[in-house]
Amino acid sequence: MPRQLALIVLMLAVAIPAAALKPIDDFEAGPFFFQTTGAYQEHFVPVFQHAGHVYTSTRKVVLEPASGSATISAQLSLTGGDDAANVTFTGGGRVRFAYHWEVPYDITEDGAYDRIEVAYNAVTPGAYFSFGIGNVGTFCGVERFPDAGPGVVSWPIDFCNQIIDPTQAIAMVLYLNAGGGDASFEVTDVRFMRSGAIIADITRDFLATQVPPIPSSPLSWRAFDHVLQPLFGTALVFESVSDGGTIPALTADLQQESFHGGDIVRSTVTWQEPGEPSFVEFLISFELTPADGLTPQIDYPPDPFIGATDFSVLLGVMLYDENGISHGTSMIRLVVTCNPAHEYEFVDVQAVVTDSGARSNDRLEVSFILESEGDFDPEEPFFDMVWMADWEDQTLTGVGDPVVIGGGPRTLVAAPSLTSSSTTLRASRPFAAGETIAIYDISGRLVRKLAPPVGAGAMVWDGRDRSGNPAASGTYLARWQGRSGAAAVARVVRVR
């Protein structure tokens, strides 16, 4: 009986209120190691890779011990494929990562961004983050006390309450504060966020392909905005697949379904080889192709979150016309989750942006190895691959803006958004009678419905489904629904 290897590819544009677009710093470039005992130090680290994805060519690292005997170390380290800044304190103090471009700059990019987010893997209890924005002669900052991690903390861009005009900012600083004693931080990303996106429609170009030969023929589709304006195409190709020296026979088809006003593209891959592979190595490419005079370019380099049985890759895409003017942005997330029916783990994951040849930065290559840790059930899907994209058109007024209710935007934020247990869903205004928060999985299935306390500004989802069982690893959408029909959505990624 042929072994069934189900690979699901989703092309989905969901109105996610907190879609990351562009990093201030993802620590993917400029290695460093600094240490001091008692002495104040300043260091400048060049950011020489991914030119243009941060706002300055250097990162200023400032070490400030709390006393003459306190020791601070700060270094860049590779953690599971995602670079991170590791900072440790003995005796207290703080470390600053400063970004200064000396001339007024619009950090909202004409309203495309509305918050700043810091993603971290771990923080010692009691330690805390501060983030500051400054212009000529004025500077302000706000503290955030995070959970132990992994997680995310965020600040609205206007957190300075108009003391700082974000369209005239000249500097930003991330502070890592020890909180008076020994502490450690592992920070992976400092990035801009935006609220809202429109839902794309999908049209299939290829319905099916046979694999091998390797590389395969492309499974391809195109994305359209809400007025059926073509945005960009996507071509998925199996570049190589090996189970230890042989190229297995695979088949793949492409299916399309409606979902929340947009479309889903699914692909089912069938493993034809007999026997149980001890490991399988994949190299898959996703090439973005122009549509209707707009050329896609990956503007945000791969930002992976990697676990034993799942990983996700985040990257941003901008569409440019023939004059080099940006017409909009799309945030793409690739999520791969191994089926728990199989005892396989990801032992190596790499995500690289390359050039197609005709264009630059328009191709994503993802390689990974799944290694057997035990059983493999031929009747079960092997793993799911989820391809999601949102879209915000910079040429249309009001597209992607949060719903305004009672004088303020209705937004919902999950903190942490990457969690192995519970997460807190924070609302932009107090919950009213009759409102609900519904938790959906990425296929649109209702997982849990919550009744938020009237008058509260936040509530906790414990990570369980309607039956009281822990929800599986994967991406979930928390939808805050009002009686008027207005809604806001937050994304939660559960890992085990």
Image: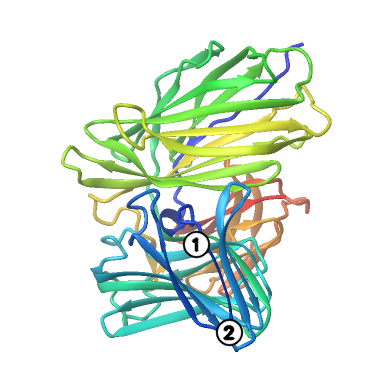
Instruction: Using a 10 Å C-alpha cutoff, classify the residue at mark 1 as few (fewer than 14 neighbours), some (14 to 19) or many (20 or more).
Output: some
Mark toward the start of the polypeptide (1 vs 2) = 2
Closer to the camera, 203 or 312?
A: 312
* Residue type at numbered disc 1: Gly
Query: Could you tell me which secondary element the residue under label 2 belongs to?
Result: loop
Rendering coords of residue 379 (x, y %): 76, 22
Q: Residue furthest bottom?
A: 67
Q: Is residue 437 left or right of residue 321?
A: right
Residue at position x 51%, y 64% in the image? 118
- Distance between mark 1 and mark 2 Cα atoms: 54 Å
In this figure, which residue is indicated by the disc labeled 2? 38
Mark toward the viewer: 1 or 2: 2
Rendering coords of residue 283 (x, y %): 55, 27
Residue at position x 55%, y 25% in the image? 267
Q: Is residue 234 above or below residue 443?
A: above
Rendering coords of residue 362 (x, y %): 36, 35
